[in-house]
């Protein structure tokens, strides 16, 4: 197996801090994309920009294009060596609409925008991996996808629709998320679903407006909404197999504008999370039944809008085993968590629906460094020691896949 060069830690950290200082929201990652593309070109990658609007793809090939070698292998003797393979590594680039509360020398310089989920680290890790793999120059093709709009913008869908899985078509896909729930030095890798589906829920209750002092002449949609918050939980507690994980959260209620007026309409917003399966399939129908039934009890009506934002992120068993083996060599077997999962969502799911692969959690929590706040918090920060672990994990995994016979 080709040897990997040492990690340029100084540049890795400098990159992360630069991206942290200049966060950009989904589909607005113009500065970020320009810097990513420039670095990939300097490293000798074929670069395509504007993928899915603001995404960047870098490809490095050896021994001719993967597609040509695949065709050659199909047409020649079966005893020839396997044709070179292609591996895809993905990093997301977008920030969040959060005002940073950290007192850092490299805090966000953009009002109301912050890298509060670790994507600044993901970009820096991706560039460091690109540098190491370019030097090692393994056989086959390396495809690095720097994706826009992971935070609810379906950026993965946008880049896939724009050809991210073509020329060459990857044989495997890998990625990782810096994860504040795990301490630095710990890596979590599991087969099967590791991130949940993300479904968005909007229920509009229509009643009849009137005077707050004469509620008998009105049909109060706010009261219906209040009952719905409780009733919807029975979808989880009484309409779902309790051995199957699921979450239903109502996160907002909007209705009315003043003290003495009963409005004619109220709206509830929420989310449903599952790991797939029967409840994933049935949830829209069950929620609509409950919403309409409760509304009808009060003489009101309910309209349900149910949107599938993202499917579960499902790791391939053999790819998870390969990545876990690499992780054990980096942090030790005792620091590789074999069954960690979250009900958060991640649009790496769209890549793994189409390509066998694995998505890992790389711990970045360190209270001594102030890196102990949850994702999406205005105080979120990462322990930068986790960056080198992430670079080792992705670069070694890609190299192992390209040079192994699996």
Image (cartoon, rainbow, N blue to C red):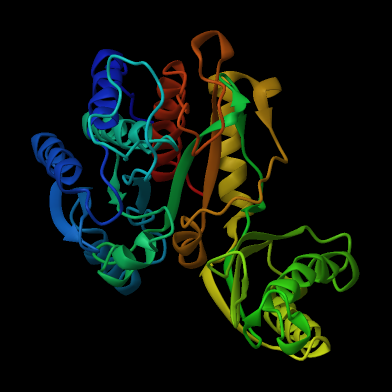
Residue at the location (34% across, 72% down)?
74
In front: 354, or 309?
Answer: 309
Task: Identify the image quadrant of the N terminus.
Answer: top left
Residue at the location (73% across, 41% down)?
339
Residue 290 falls in image quadrant: bottom right
Q: In this view, does 99 lie to the left or right of 295?
A: left
In front: 59, or 195?
Answer: 195
Residue at the location (72% across, 85% down)?
219
**Residue 285 picture location, percent across and down:** 72, 84
In front: 19, or 68?
Answer: 19
Say how many tags the image has.
0
Residue 42 falls in image quadrant: top left
Farthest residue in the front direction? 213
Q: Is residue 339 left or right of residue 310?
A: right
**Residue 268 picture location, percent across and down:** 62, 69
Residue 235 appearing in the image = yes
**Residue 206 picture location, percent across and down:** 63, 86
Residue at the location (72% across, 75% down)?
213
Vertical comparison of 289 with 25: above or below? below
**Residue 248 picture location, percent across and down:** 71, 62
Vertical comparison of 28 with 362: above or below? below
Q: Is residue 145 left or right of residue 268?
A: left
Residue 132 appearing in the image = no
In front: 198, or 133?
Answer: 198
Vertical comparison of 149 with 259: above or below? above
Q: Is residue 23 left or right of residue 173?
A: left
């Amino acid at each position: 197996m080709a040897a990997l060069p040492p990690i340029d830690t100084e540049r890795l950290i400098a990159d992360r801090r630069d991206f942290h200082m200049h966060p950009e929201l989904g589909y607005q990652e113009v500065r970020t994309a320009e810097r990513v593309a420039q670095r990939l070109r300097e490293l000798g990658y074929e670069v395509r920009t504007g993928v899915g609007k603001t995404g960047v793809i870098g490809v490095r090939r050896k021994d001719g294009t993967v597609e040509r070698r695949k065709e050659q292998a199909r047409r020649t003797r079966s005893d020839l060596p396997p044709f070179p393979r292609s591996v895809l590594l993905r990093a997301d680039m977008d920030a969040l609409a959060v005002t940073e509360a950290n007192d850092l020398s490299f805090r966000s310089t953009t009002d109301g925008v912050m890298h509060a989920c670790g994507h600044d680290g993901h970009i820096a890790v991706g560039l460091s991996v690109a540098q190491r793999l370019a030097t090692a120059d393994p056989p086959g093709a390396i495809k690095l996808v720097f994706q826009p709009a992971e935070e609810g913008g379906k950026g993965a869908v946008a880049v896939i629709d724009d050809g991210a899985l073509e020329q060459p078509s990857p044989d495997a896909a890998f990625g990782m998320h810096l994860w504040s729930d795990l301490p630095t030095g710990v890596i979590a890798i599991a087969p099967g679903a590791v991130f949940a589906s993300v479904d968005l829920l909007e229920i509009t209750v229509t009643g009849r407006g009137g005077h707050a002092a004469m509620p008998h002449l009105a049909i109060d949609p706010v009261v219906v909404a209040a009952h719905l918050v409780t009733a919807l939980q029975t979808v989880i507690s009484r309409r779902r197999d309790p051995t199957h994980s699921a979450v239903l959260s109502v996160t907002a209620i909007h209705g009315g504008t003043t003290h003495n007026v009963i409005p004619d309409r109220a709206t509830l917003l929420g989310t449903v999370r599952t790991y797939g399966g029967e409840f994933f399939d049935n949830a829209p129908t069950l929620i609509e039944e409950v919403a309409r039934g409760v509304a009808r009890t009060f003489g009101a009506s309910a309209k349900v809008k149910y949107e599938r934002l993202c499917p579960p992120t499902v790791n391939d068993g053999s790819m998870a085993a390969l990545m876990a083996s690499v992780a054990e060599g980096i942090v030790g077997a005792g620091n590789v968590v074999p069954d960690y999962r979250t009900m958060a969502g991640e649009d790496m799911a769209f890549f793994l629906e189409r390509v066998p692969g694995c998505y890992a959690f790389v711990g970045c929590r360190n209270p001594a460094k102030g890196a102990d706040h949850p994702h999406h918090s205005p105080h979120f920060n990462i322990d930068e020691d986790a960056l080198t672990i992430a670079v080792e994990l992705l670069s070694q995994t890609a190299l192992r896949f390209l040079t192994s016979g699996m």
